[in-house]
Image (cartoon, helix red, strand yellow):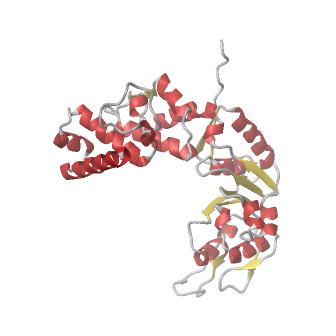
Amino acid sequence: MAEETQIRTSVFLGMKAVIASQPMLRLMERVERAARSSASVLITGESGSGKELVARAIHQLSPRSHRSWVDLSCAALPEHLLESELFGYDRGAFSGADTAKPGLFELAHQGTLFLDEVGELEPKMQVKLLRVLDGVPYYRLGGTKKVSADVRVVAATNQNLERLVDEGRFRGDLFHRLSQLTLHVPPLRERVEDIAPLANYLLEQNSPGGSFTDRALRLLETQPWKGNVRELRNVVMKAVVMHADCGTDAQIDIDHLPVGAIPAAAPSAGAPPPSDVASLEGMERRMIFDALAATGGHQQRAAARLGISRRTLSRKLKIYEAERAGAAL
C-alpha cells in the first residue's frame, strides 16, 4: 500500500502554511537555517507562489521574532511616497507634513523589514536603499538629525534581478547586498503533492465541512496554475459560490470547478470548447451554457439564475454565435 502523504501545517505571523511536497519541505529546511543568521535574504518565485509566507517564516523563526515585522510593496507607491514611507519625514518637510513621521526602517528597528516586489524600485531609490543597507545613517525627509536603524531586510521579487542587472535596470551592488542568501519558492505545478491539501484547506475556509470528490482533486492536480496558490484560492472560492448548495456540507465535483478541460461526455450543440474554459472569459461562457442547460434553454430564467439581465445574456449569446461562425470560415 502506498505510503500516505504527510502534511505539515504551520502558522507564520497569522499566515498558514500547508506543506506536503518534498520541494517545499526542503525549502522550509533552508528557511530555518536562513532564519538563524542575520544575513539579508532575497526570495524569488512566481507571483502567488508563497514568497510572503517564506518571509514571515524567516522572521518568526529568527532571533528577531520578538521585535517588529514591517512589510511594504515597492510597486504599490510612487517614488516620492515610497521614500517618505521608508525613511520618514520631519514636520514641514513638504506641504501637509504637519507632524513628523518615522519611516519603516525606524519602525522595524531590531526587527525585520520585508520589501516585496523589490525589482520595481526606481534607480534613485536603489541608491538610497543600498546606503542604508550598508549601515550608513540617513536623514528623514526635511530632517536635520541622522537616523540609524538596525534592520534585517528580506526582499522578494518575481523578476530575474540578474537579468535586470545585465540590462542596467537594477544595480549590481544592491542585488548582491540583498541576495546574501537566496531562497527560491517553486511554482505550484512543480509541487503537485501540495495541491490537494491546499485545496482542502481553502475549501474549509470558504465552506466549513465541505469536501472535494476524488476526481475533483485529481483534476486540480492536472492544472498548470500559472497564478499559483493565489489562482487556486480563487478557483476554490468560485466553485463554492457557484455550487447549487454552498452550505457547510457542500461537495465539490469536477462540474463545479472553473478550470481546464473536464473529462465528461461529448458537449451539447453550442457548448463552449473545453480549451476555452481555462480563461476567465471561458469560465463565464461555461456558466452561461450551464444555466441554459439547467433551464431547458429558457433565456429569461437562465438570466435570472446568473444574476444578469435578459439583454446581457442575449448579447453574450450573439457574440458566441459570431465567434463560432468566424471559426467555421
Tell me: residue 294, above or below residue 162.
above
Camera-side residue of 125 and 215: 215
Residue 262, x across and y down, in percent: 44, 31
Q: Position of residue 104 (x, y in %)?
A: 65, 68
Tally of numbered discs: 0
Residue 66 seen by the camera: no
> Could you tell whether 159 is left or right of 234 in the image?
right
Q: Nearer the viewer, residue 51 or 214?
A: 214
Position in image of residue 15 (x %, y %): 59, 45
Q: Quadrant of residue 119?
A: bottom right
Where does residue 8 sit, x and y in percent of width and height? 65, 32
Query: Which image quadrant for residue 283?
Result: top left
Residue 96 against residue 230 in the figure, above or below: below
Q: Residue at x 65, y 86 (%)?
A: 142
Q: Nearer the viewer, residue 4 or 119?
A: 119
Does 196 sit above or below residue 324?
above
Q: Is residue 288 above or below residue 219?
A: below
Tell me if 273 is positioned left or right of 8 in this view.
left
**Residue 13 seen in the current view:** yes
- Image quarter where the N terminus lies is top right
Q: Residue at x 64, y 20 (%)?
A: 4
**Residue furthest top in the image:** 1
Q: Residue at x 60, y 86 (%)?
A: 93
Image quadrant where residue 229 sits = top right
The answer to whether 101 appears left or right of 216 in the picture is right
**Residue closer to the observer: 121 or 255:** 255
